[in-house]
Image (cartoon, rainbow, N blue to C red):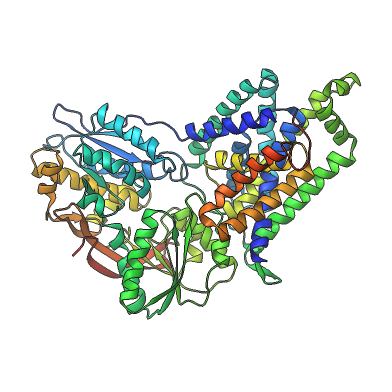
Amino acid sequence: MKKLLLMLCAVVMLGATACGDDKGGGSADGGGDETVVGLVAPQTGFAANYGPEAQQGIDMALAKLGKDSSVKIKIVTADEDVLDASKTLERVKKMVETDGAEIVLGPVFGSTQQAVAPYLSGRGLPWFSFLGAGKDLATKGSAFIWPGADSLTAGPLGTYAAEELGYKKIATLAPDYAYGHDTMDGAVKEFEAAGGKVAQQQWVPLGTTDMLQYATAMDTSVDALLMWLVPTDAAAFVREYRNLGIKVPLLMFQGVFDPTFQEVGEQLVGEIGLNEYNPDLDNAANNDFVAAYGDEFDGIPNQTTAFAYTVTNAIVSGLEKSDGEASLEALRKALDGLELDTVIGPASYNADGIASSNRTVVKAAKGADGRYVWEPVKTYEGIGAPK
Amino acid sequence: MQIVANGVSIGAVLFLMAAGLSLLIGSMGVLNLAHGAVYMAGAYLGWTICVDNGLPLPVAVIGAGVGTALIGVLFERLFHLIGGQADQQILLSFGLVEVLVNLSQWIWGAVAKSPFQVSWLAGSVKVGSASIPVARLAIAVVGFLVAALLWFVQDRTRVGAIVRAGMDDPSMVRALGINLDLVVAGVFVLGSAVAGIAGVMGGLVLGASSAQAIDVLLLALIVVVVGGVGSVVGTFSAAILIGVLDAYSRSWLPEMSSVVLYALMALVLVVRPTGLSGRAAR
């Protein structure tokens, strides 16, 4: 029994250490006046894809800067521990106090954002969320939030469900943490404002991988299930949902990203989603970005890469306008109302640092080349910032 | 009924995860923290065979079982080299976890693989008022078969008798001229193969990811603590109990679901430290 107890203690230690360590990362052109930007995103664990995907977007944005550019950026990185925000906070402190980060890009997850935001705002350091955040982190802190506040970003899906699809009663499914609640609340608010009712809400604890119980517990008398889960969890849920033969239509905030989408696309054809980013959007900035990504990585970019690219471009635009001044005040002033030509169309930050941008309602389909795609159906403009 | 069915199906996966570990601790006294990483390797091997190459699921089960058995051979030799010191075993298995996790990320990437899709396991069947996905039934069937096979070998064969005798009094077994090292090496390899098979079957509902190296180990340890080491029947009973308890707690007390499992483990450690089977670890 002593051995078993020893083993249990060791497993706890292993769990704590196996999540990796922070490390200095790649850089753009080094120079005397370079601005140090710190990327905070998961590099290990169940969300380990976010860090490398964000790094791709940053590298692509920095590669566009010529040697004569007035803006020079050096990137340092830290691993975001999704299950231990205090550990991430320590890494962010090291990133700022030792590595000299003047601007922070990330973190990704709401629980981590809540943990590091007081430290960053206390030091007056600007930080740029590239995958959403609660609006208070901008209005009462030092965040810049792209592509918009969590509580507003999914609203058009609720509007579309009620007004275009005529749904009266829905169920919801989302992770049981800040981002899941904020996005679902936003969509539900718009759905109810348009006359709809919510019959059931299920919240999935963070780290849950077995989705069967949520499928079996679902109220199948509803018109649709409004859901958001991270791609692999969404894929697992859809697999159980289909196995159980449930026919209730899905309304998928963010759909399912590649590469997971290609694994489960057959089971999603015909379902409706709402994308913040969609590689099939037809605008010049996105077409250039997708082509450049294909040349560099021989694939199709996902939202994490696209938005890390977009926000890095925004930081560069802000630094160009502020003559390299990286303070919160200078960047807020530089970016306020500055029109940004982004991969999801025209967008801008408001005076509080919250972006307003386009959202696209999409439908899952199989393309002519056999690849599963989210086909754009309807675009809602100016979403994400409080009116 | 639905909740019980959900719990039994995940309990079968838990049994497959924990069976090898229980035998390893019970028969060899080896603290193999890399057991979850072996499960993970089985899941990825299964994904490569079944999903990436489109081969039938039974081929994936056999392939992953053989692959992880080979990993088990390597691990057993390493554990044999360092002897029976618990601290050295833990340090060694720490290193093996890191090696396997990093190798898996290098080979298969950091993005988790979604649950395997096997066309003949699609759909569900009605059992009373419950709907049970066919894939879950397949997992339960494999779990029951492996449990029955392990029980038969352990309780009804000469090899099983040697293993059980070795757990209780290794010196006496050696004094009888039995090569106990060879027997326990066989148990190590068998335990690793079962972990690999568990990875493939678990992959039908959980997919494959490098995080499983730790997640699975923790779940398997809870099962081993509750079931008692070295007992197939104890491990099986504990796995089903924990699967059903977890399903009920997630349904009735979702905020407390993980606490319930740890509370059960703590209770067993305090009230009955030898677990359901009542056999002490070597």
**Residue A102 in the image: x percent, y percent?**
20, 35
Which residue is at 53% across, 56% downward? B254
Q: Is residue A319 left or right of residue A105?
A: left
Question: Quadrant of the rendered structure where residue A324 is?
Answer: top left
Q: Nearer the viewer, residue A340 or A170?
A: A170
Which residue is at 15% across, 42% downward? A328
**Residue A373 in the image: x percent, y percent?**
40, 63
Is residue B135 visible in the rendered image? The answer is no
Is the residue A223 above or below the residue B154 in the image? below
Q: Nearer the viewer, residue B215 or A299?
A: B215
**Residue B16 in the image: x percent, y percent?**
69, 46
Question: Quadrant of the rendered structure where residue A297 is?
Answer: top left
**Residue B216 in the image: x percent, y percent?**
60, 42
Q: Nearer the viewer, residue B51 or A267?
A: A267
- Which quarter of the image is occupied by the N terminus of chain B? bottom right
Is residue B220 visible in the rendered image? The answer is yes
- Which quarter of the image is occupied by the C terminus of chain B? top right
Q: Is residue A193 left or right of residue B21?
A: left
